[in-house]
Amino acid sequence: MNTDEWREVHDLHHQGMSIKAIAAHLGMSRNTVRRALTFAQPPQDHRPRRGSSADELAPAVASLLDEDPEISIAEIQRRVGWSRSRNTLAKLVHRLREDLSSSPESFEGKPFATPQIPTFATSFIGRDRELTALRTLLGEKRLITISGPGGIGKTRLAVEAASEFRRAFPDGVRFVEIASLHSPTLMPQTVVDGLGIASRDRPEQSTDDVVIEFLRHKQILIVLDNCEHMIDACARLVSKILRYTTRATIVVTSRETLSIPEEHVFAVPSLPTIREESARAVGAAMELFENRAAAVLSGFAITESNNEVVRRICTQLDGIPLAIELACARLTALSVQDLADRLDHRLDILTVGNRGGPTRHQSLQATVDWSYELCTPNQQQLWARLSVFAGVFDLSMAEQVCGDDDVVPGEILDAIAGLVSKSVLRREESLGRVRFRMLETIREYGAGKLTSADAEKMRTRHLRWCSDLVRAASEAWTGHEQQAAADSLRGNRANLRLALQTAFSNPTPQMIDAAAEIASTWFLWSSAFSVREHRLWLTRIAEIDRAPSVRRSRVLATLGIVLTMQGDRAAANEALDEALLLAGPRHDEATVAFATQSKGLCTYLGGEFESAQNLLLDALHRYEHLPGRTDLLWTLHIEMGMFYSSTLDTARAIEHFDFVRHQAEQSRERWMLSYAIYGSGLVALVNEQYTDALRYALESLTLKRAFDDVVGTTLVTDLLGWAEAAAGSAERSAVLIGAASELWSSFGMQLYGSAHWVQLRARFESSALAAIGDRRYLDCQRRGAAMSLPDLVEYALDELGQNVVEGESKPVVTSTLTQRESEVARLVAQGLSNKEIAARLVISHRTVEGHVERVLRKLGLIRRHQIATALG
């Protein structure tokens, strides 16, 4: 037993876990657990060290890989002075690269990427002492609240600490922005989104528990940024996380402390204007001023002539970073002396009430007031109106929502440019697109400048803009602009949430109509919201808008399909029955067809095949007279293909899948195409064509990476796991099925709560279980269940099994195979299934599975279909 194992046993025992549970959790005997508990200190580990002769180079190699992930084996060999076997060194490098690729940081820039720590273009100045203190606290405390007034640099300090110390957290660092959140009920869901996982929610399980399940034993650092407006909801969730997890560390940035027992408050001081060691030396605040001023005025430097003036400015601004940055932005029009003089005047006349706030906050208010007054009237008015946006916005959004006779759309570009130059707006550029963001303090200030009438007008326009956004996405959903539409929905998630919340705060018929148009768009769960959140919005609209109408029928029909995906069939049928009852007499044929289709799917998943077929065929007939609903027609064909796969009528199933595939390829659509390709894989699986099933599943999963489609990704992952089991890759199958099982919990019941789908999975599970045994199977399942969505997709699409190291072909050593293994390998390469190989060689099916597993392991492969390539 090593020190880590001893410590984990003691930690779990202190949490109240029984000896039996600890043994099961850690995969050791109960006697070993009991023996560990008898030691007050970790026992001496006398076991001989085993491993590669190159292991002692691991720290040096890891450092080189960290500096340059693309560094070659030859260069590493030269840099570390390795004179022994290059193959041994290559194995070490390969292992370390795998370790690095499993960390959340490796997924930057990919569509399923875990939200990353923000980066800043400007340098980090004057907080070395605070960083050192935070390092100590992060080793001792599980909850640290970085507190202080707005603009003091709480977020920047948290980001730097998270970046600096991320290596201390093996399960990674997550940054969750709370600033744009407006409803406390969405706090847990926002944290789920920020963790980079699908919402681990079951219909009967709270989202709090979803977060806890994911974090229960992870050594991870979570930064919750700008929590003061959600302080109660944040305190409740954080308390629960700390109570029911073991190793998660949380850093909160907030103007107000959480006031819970576990909290350690770290108050961020102002930047000093002088150094303690010398009353004349430049302090951190002045260093910041010099750095930011130089960005505005090329060549600016603190000299003997301006030293005292700069010191006076920084002192008057209380050393608050945001205030200093806003002041420096004015140097385009003022000298340093002019700036100091104007600050003197503004601070003297300022009187601002601030409930319980520190004096420094009044100084920040003075700076923002002054910045506001330096803007032109047009810029001031636009500043106030732009506060209606949550998160980010672009020029087009500003023109459409904020432009009218008072703020002429044609002048908004110049006004935005002026606000950027005054540091009121932050400019962000990604993938060739420029967007803008307001600091929360500045956004709140702008909102306070709106009259009640103007604020209402802006909120109404914002809601209408969001409604138009969703309508445009719906119109583009089956064409080549689908990806752009999905990206737009995903990028405006915060705006969509705010718009819906606005409608509920003032539920006039016009507001609810716009909200219903947004929420009743059936595919929002694939791009804008999680399934659970989509259900939440639909349910709230249905509760508010109870009058019989076409609008209500459409909301209920969409709610019905969302409930069906969650496996909540009783509630789904209730919603769909009412939708049909309302839509029929009002001659809303599109809603009748959609509700009929969804009811057919719900019935099929419930195992009533005959009734389901009648409903699905009825819906198909109705769509033939509704040429404008291509999106729903395609989904119906996918559902019918799945239905006929379940009835083993694979010829009819492939007709439906091929129909969608042809149509999608013609229109350059990708999302429904991924489902059609998945369907081809499902048919191949039913027909025992396992190599084809693997190929189709991987192709489908590759397409799904561009969307936030947790439902479809989970469905494809399960298919891939089944195909791997059937093809003889039992360990890989267990990992994938374990990951899929956990993902199903993100939005409802396993495999839609469908008994016959669950039975199908059990068949392949039992095959993999028999091949590798209970213990190994459970270990692999746990590994899969612990994966985040990026981890899973990267693992599923991994190509490390193709025997390539540093771009050079790695020779396959077939001499390590026994005669029987070579014989089995050749038959696998010919495309024979395990069942066919068993018949050919007159041996048991299980014996063949064992041979295939050993062949894969000896050849360093991952998937069965790679054997043919390996054998040449």
Image (cartoon, grey):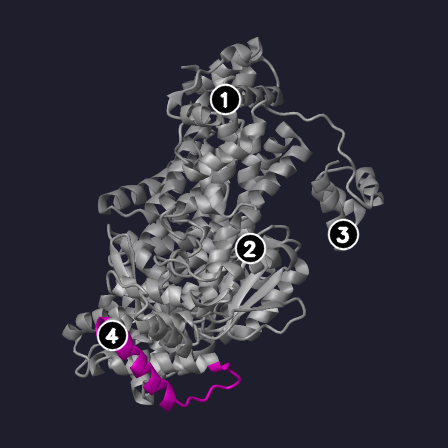
C-alpha distance separating marks 2 and 4: 44 Å
Q: In this view, does 524 lie to the left or right of 843?
A: left
| Category of crowding for the residue at label 3, using alpha-carbon neighbours closer than 10 angstroms: few (below 14), some (14–19), many (at least 20) | some
Residue 205 quadrant: bottom right
| Category of crowding for the residue at label 4, using alpha-carbon neighbours closer than 10 angstroms: few (below 14), some (14–19), many (at least 20) | few
Lower sequence index among marks 1 and 3? 3
Residue 549 shows in this picture: no
Residue bearing the label numbered 2: 221
C-alpha distance separating marks 4 and 3: 67 Å
**Amino acid found under the numbered disc labelled 3:** Met
Lower sequence index among marks 3 and 2? 3
**Amino acid found under the numbered disc labelled 1:** Trp
C-alpha distance separating marks 1 and 3: 47 Å
Residue bearing the label numbered 3: 17
C-alpha distance separating marks 2 and 1: 36 Å
Q: Is mark 4 on a helix, strand or loop?
A: loop
Decide which of 242, 772 is in the foreground and name it: 242
Q: Verify whether residue 334 appears in magenta.
A: yes
Lower sequence index among marks 2 and 1? 1
Residue bearing the label numbered 1: 82
State the residue at coordinates (59%, 13%).
Answer: 842
Q: Give the range drawn in magenta.
A: 332-359
| Category of crowding for the residue at label 1, using alpha-carbon neighbours closer than 10 angstroms: few (below 14), some (14–19), many (at least 20) | some
Decide which of 143, 12 is in the foreground and name it: 143
Q: Is mark 2 on a helix, strand or loop?
A: strand
